[in-house]
Image (cartoon, grey):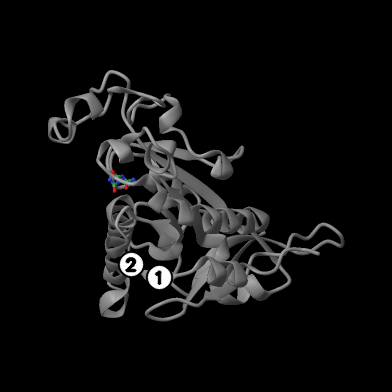
Amino acid sequence: MIAVVRRGAVARSNLAVRSQNPGWPRFCSPDWCLAYVYAPSPGSLTPPMPFVTIEAEPDAVTVDLDRTALIIIDMQRDFLEPGGFGEALGNDVSCLAAAVEPCRAVLEAVRRCGLLVIHTREGHRPDLSDVPPAKMERGAPKLRIGAAGPMGRILVRGEPGHDIIDVLYPVSGEPVIDKPGKGAFYQTELELMLHNRGIENLLVCGVTTEVCVNTTVREANDRGYRCVVLGDCCASYFPRLHEAGLAMIKAQGGIFGWVSTSRSAITALGPAPT
Ligand code: TIU
């Protein structure tokens, strides 16, 4: 049946709310909304996901897990392994390794809970027609975007270096957003996907903290998403800029969002079944 339901109460009730149609917000208030509601039938009820509170800075943040997605930014060989774009820019790629295990643990917990997972990759068409000249002309010519490297052409879609590292590789049902820029919303279908799924909150992981993570969080914040950046799931080639990147997000009462940790997020998502 279709019912008017109070948002908070619904998630904790013994009714199963299967869908809140994204086309309906104009009939809804922050507290009340229209939803398809199914009365429980013994043995068939999937409990709705709860509101959870994640310890974070500057304050703890409460999110509705039904409206929360994990976005993993650019955990690609091109940034994390030698011979790719990151190294071509003169960086020590080993600096990013610390984020991998926390990302893996969060990804496992999020998959267990059935939250939407979205992966992004920075990269360009093989004909390089989507590379702005101003992006292309930076760096030594032999190491520029499109040049041949040990992992294929640098930062080009379809090349081994462009793909996501094995340990975080997407599984079926997890969209991968290919983006030509630093921000995941720029010239991509990310906003449409989030809208279609009724997503309001983003758990954010990935690299690099001050470049693609910060750009994406700023874009998301302006679009009204609550961004909870898991600091230990992010990394930079410059530890100082990693810290600054996180500090900028949580400053001024959380001007761009919240900063938390993999541990706090996993705790909020609940323990693994024994
Ligand atoms: N160079 C650098 O720190 N980052 C990027 O070029 N892209 C991303 O952050 N993904």
Check disc 2 and give the amino acid type.
Answer: Leu
Residue at 44% across / 72% down in the picture? 30
Q: How many marks?
A: 2
In the rendered image, the quadrant that contains the C terminus is bottom right
Callout 1 amino acid: Val
Q: Which residue is mark 1?
A: 259
Crowd tier of the residue under label 1, counting other residues whose Cα lies within 10 Å: few below 14, some 14–19, many 20 or above: many
| Residue 246, disc | 2
Tell me the crowding category of disc 2: few under 14, some 14 to 19, or many 20 or more residues within 10 angstroms, Cα based. many
The residue shown at (57%, 73%) is: 52
Q: Quadrant of residue 42?
A: bottom right
Check mark 1 vs ligand 1: CB closer than 8 Å? yes or no: no
Q: Earlier in the sequence, mark 2 or mark 1?
A: 2
Regarding residue 213, the answer to whether it shows in the image is yes
Quarter residue 173 falls in:
top right
| Residue 2 rendering spot, x and y as whole percentages | 62, 60
Rendered location of residue 265, percent (x, y): 54, 68
On screen, 151 above or below 193?
Answer: above
Query: Tags 2 and 1 in contact by the CB under 8 Å rule?
Result: yes
Say above or below: 224 vs 145.
Answer: below
In the shown orientation, is residue 62 left or right of residue 89? Answer: right
The residue closer to the viewer here, 267 or 27, is 267
Q: Position of residue 90 (x, y in %)?
A: 25, 42
The correct choice, above or below, for 200 with respect to 111 in the image is below
- Determine the image quadrant of residue 49: bottom right
- Residue 130 visible? The answer is no
Residue 259 is situated, as x and y percent measured from the top left of the image, at 40, 70
